[in-house]
Amino acid sequence: EMEHENYTVVTEFVLLGLSQNHDVQMILFFFFLLFYIIILPGNILIILTIRGDSQLGSPMYFFLANLAFLDICYSSVTPPKMLADFFSHQKIISYSACMAQLFFLHFLGAAEAFMLMVMAYDRYVAICKPLHYTRLVKRGVCCVLVGATWAGGFIHGIILFALSIHLPLCGPNILDNFFCDVHQLVKLACANTYIVELLMFLNNGVVIIMCFTLLLISYIVLLLKLRTQSFKAKNKVASTCVSHMIVVFAMCGPAMYIYGLPFQAVPMEKVVAVFHTVIFPLTNPMIYTLRNKVIKGSMWKLVSKYILWCGK
């Protein structure tokens, strides 16, 4: 830290992490490492399977591959630092690294929320307007929608980043978590930050609540539409909608819990943050694929081909 005028300027932060107990830290390290070793290659396999199988050329699988890529990127923002810190006596992160972590966390998190909305739109058109599906969700439109999710996420992230770097931080430079986030930095501010907190809430809490509400309404409409479908179509559509809704609740639930209440401390924030930033992002694409026989069959073919190639 260094003195600047009448207050202290924070140049680095001390992260308290998930636990101060060494044995607990080692258990958590091996648990998260094992989780990454199993799930991360699974997401990469989903992308390779979709790209390599011509049967999986529909927009739904194109969006799923992009969701898997987003989840891999999102899960690379905070966990690597968390895993390294399990072996550090004092967990230090510089101010610039903290701001970068904050930006990419919200950039990729918002892009993922918008991607779920795009996937909901795809399912809505497929079920409610099947005759117009090829026109409304053609390849060019899909690329534009995916580009829009990345652009929307970037705008969301850059706004929060701009608000955060202008916070007058003066310590103590201790963050009671395993990563940097906006509401933790607000606690270190020297001056009254109600206006900044309100802007952060409008850009963060309101966005995630709005996304969740729109997604929930869209899937409720789709499930109601099933009453007019045949039994076979009902099973197929219901399976897809249930998978999507599980992911929506898994992603939006913790986010709304953390960011939906401005100016208030959040109980069990660390536990919820672990699920929000580590567990659910990597499992989201897996939830889709476990309920999809076509992609499971294609994945097994790819794995079998690779095993045969290694055997030769």
Image (cartoon, rainbow, N blue to C red):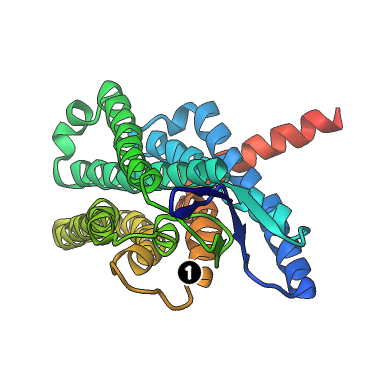
Image coordinates for residue 65, horizontal then vertical, percent: 46, 37
Q: Residues within 10 Å of mark 1 (few under 14, many from 20)?
A: some
Rendered image quadrant of residue 76: top right
Residue 151: percent from left, percent from top: 31, 32
Q: Secondary structure at mark 1?
A: helix
- Above or below, 308 relative to 86: above
Which residue lies under the disc numbered 1? 272
The residue that appears at 78% across and 28% down in the rendered structure is: 309
Q: Residue at x 60, y 39 (%)?
A: 45
Query: Residue 81, how many percent across, how many down?
Result: 65, 50
Q: Residue at x 30, y 36 (%)?
A: 155
Q: Farthest residue to the front: give it.
A: 5
Asked whether 25 or 111 is in front, the reply is: 25
Residue 286 screen position, x and y as percent: 52, 52
Task: Identify the amino acid type marked 1.
Answer: Val
Please report the residue visible at 22 percent of the width from the left and 55 percent of the height from the top: 202
